[in-house]
Image (cartoon, rainbow, N blue to C red):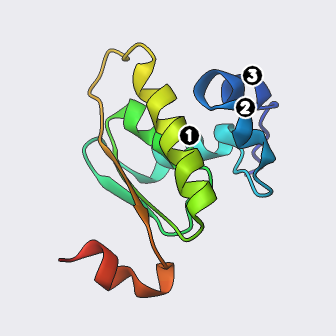
Amino acid sequence: MMLTFKSDVAKRKRFFTPECFAHPAKMHLGMLLWIIGKYTKPEETILDPMAGSGSLMLATRYDRNVVLVELEQKFVDMAKANWDKVKSLPKLKWGWGECQIIQGDARQLEGLLVG
């Protein structure tokens, strides 16, 4: 199967802050939403241990819960600003998931997620 996705710049502008474009490794939003639809179900929780700017938070708009872990404070701040923007947009017809943003080292997940 070959997947192709159109540019995600318009979606990224709609959902995220302009600072998000500075992140060096952005996941394509079309591919991200395809993966969410294919491999997760509503009300499940998805973990991104190296969240960067937090693109995975879009899964909350499809009734998935999201836990984002990021080491660098500048990207934690970027993800929080992006989450504020995502939350402010009109809700879709289905449920709305939660997003938790944690600053920490992905190599120490058990200490970050349990406790």
Question: In the image, what residue type sits under mark 1?
Answer: Leu
Q: Position of residue 81 (x, y in %)?
A: 53, 38
Q: Is residue 27 above or below residue 81?
A: below
Q: Position of residue 112 (x, y in %)?
A: 32, 76
Q: Is residue 2 above or below residue 4?
A: below
Q: Quote the CA–CA distance across marks 2 and 1.
A: 20 Å
Q: Which residue is mark 1?
A: 33
Residue in front for this viewpoint, 96 or 1? 96
The structure residue drawn at horizontal position 29% and vertical position 22%, both measured from the top left corner, is 94
Q: Position of residue 50 (x, y in %)?
A: 56, 67
Question: Quick one: label 2 or label 1, which is nearer the N terminus?
Answer: 2
Which label sits in the foreground, 3 or 2? Answer: 2
Residue in front for this viewpoint, 65 or 87? 87
Asked whether disc 2 touches disc 1, contact meaning CB atoms under 8 Å apart, the reply is no
Residue 14 shown left or right of residue 47 in the figure: right
Is disc 1 surrounded by few (<14), some (14 to 19) or many (20+) residues within 10 Å?
A: some
For residue 18, the mark is: 2
Residue 42 shown left or right of residue 38 in the figure: left
Element type where label 2 sits in the image: helix
For residue 10, the mark is: 3
